[in-house]
Image: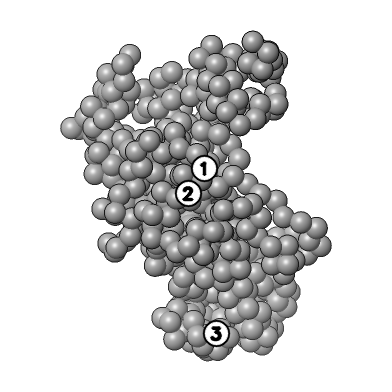
Amino acid sequence: MKAQSGVANSRLEGFRNLTPQQRWRKVVEATGLGEDEAALLAEPGALPVETADGMIENVVGTFELPLGVAANFTVNGRDYIIPMAVEEPSIIAAASFMARIVRGCGGFETSVTPPLMRAQVQIVGLSDPHGARLKILAERDRIIAAANACDKVLVELGGGCRDIEVHVFPETPGGAMAVMHLIVDVRDAMGANTVNTMAERVAPLVEELTSGTVRLRILSNLADLRLARARVAITPDALAAKELSGEEIIDRMVEAYRFAAIDPYRAATHNKGIMNGIDPLIVATGNDWRAIEAGAHVWAVRKGHYTSLTTWEKHKDGRLVGTLELPMAVGIVGGATKTHPLAKLALKILNISSAAELAQLCVALGLAQNMAAIRALATEGIQRGHMALHARNIAIVAGAVGAEIETVARELAANHDVRVERARDLLEALRHP
């Protein structure tokens, strides 16, 4: 990820103590947004119903999620303020806290592979599937040319169909099958529409070559050629707590990772925590979070059993080293990224120049979130911090408004008794002393 001008400092001191309006003004100032852009969050309803009606079918209104920002992130030497759309408390706080620890140890190191997507063309009715494979491969250049004729703009931008693969399934309940993959460089798009169009365009040619029948022509959400990677290395001093040394915390975190690596029941929750960090950025930027989830979970089982997406190891110098690699098919052009006003605003806050950069921020977030979860689980337990932040939700459910919310939430958290009934009692005492 190349360095460029952007947020001078993502370390937002005292941010949590500000009002939402004050926080937004601070983000506006830090990112250099214009007044028109700043006004988008001045009032609820930034997505007009008329715009929503053009995005999906049968629109009856819009549905809002809380939009927050994760602070403290340094990725490849550059600071970022990261917008996240999510309903669950503690996610943004946890990511920001871990990012603060990591920035003191050099920040996140990330990288990404080229934006290659797969489109699958299913061929049935074959008596000689291996022979059909060779016929297709012999006409590789012709097929690629036909695919690239679909999108001359993409080709001019340096993208386009790069190669083909043919996978043979000689024995299926319906007979022999071959599946051709178009390998397409989609540049800064997620790429679904592009590769689907190409797959449909080349289908008649494939039928001509194989004497088979083409059925499905569709992208694969297992974007195994489009990977994003993140790494952190954290010193024991940076992880030390009042009750435990940094060395002991590192040992406990590695043990927690090993649990997820061997047990799919634990791995499912472990990986859900990773996606707690990734999905909110995907949603905020108008990308397809379902595609990202699908690719991630298939990637987790690629070695034959479902396992952790992250790795956590202890380096010989005592540092904790965490890594994350997974498919990351995201875009900054096309779809909701260009039609949803807040998705466009999120990209402006990020101040990124490519889909590759967005992908790398996603895995940095996922790694930060996973680090927060296993650190909490390996030390004080997950509920202490989570319930303290959840207390505000409970206060609202109990009927608290305005300044009452913080007062009631603070008392709930202090007594480790985060229940609606207790919140109602506190609210009654507050209103009728």
Image quarter in which the C terminus is found: top right
Q: Which residue position is annotated with label 3?
A: 151
The residue sitting at 61% across, 31% down in the picture is: 402
Q: Nearer the viewer, mark 3 or mark 1?
A: 1
Using the rendered image of the protein, determine whether residue 233 is visible from the camera's viewpoint.
Answer: no
Q: Residue 123: image x %, image y %?
A: 67, 73
Q: Quadrant location of residue 376?
A: top left
The answer to which of 294 and 208 lies nearer the viewer is 294
Q: Residue 212: image x %, image y %?
A: 70, 79
Residue 427, compared with residue 18, is above or below; it is above
The mark found on residue 24 in the picture is 2
The mark found on residue 118 in the picture is none
The residue sitting at 46% across, 70% down in the picture is: 188
Position of residue 367 in the picture relative to residue 153 (left or right): left
The residue sitting at 33% across, 60% down in the picture is: 6
Q: Amino acid at mark 2?
A: Trp
Using the rendered image of the protein, determine whether residue 134 is visible from the camera's viewpoint.
Answer: yes
Image quarter in which the N terminus is found: bottom left
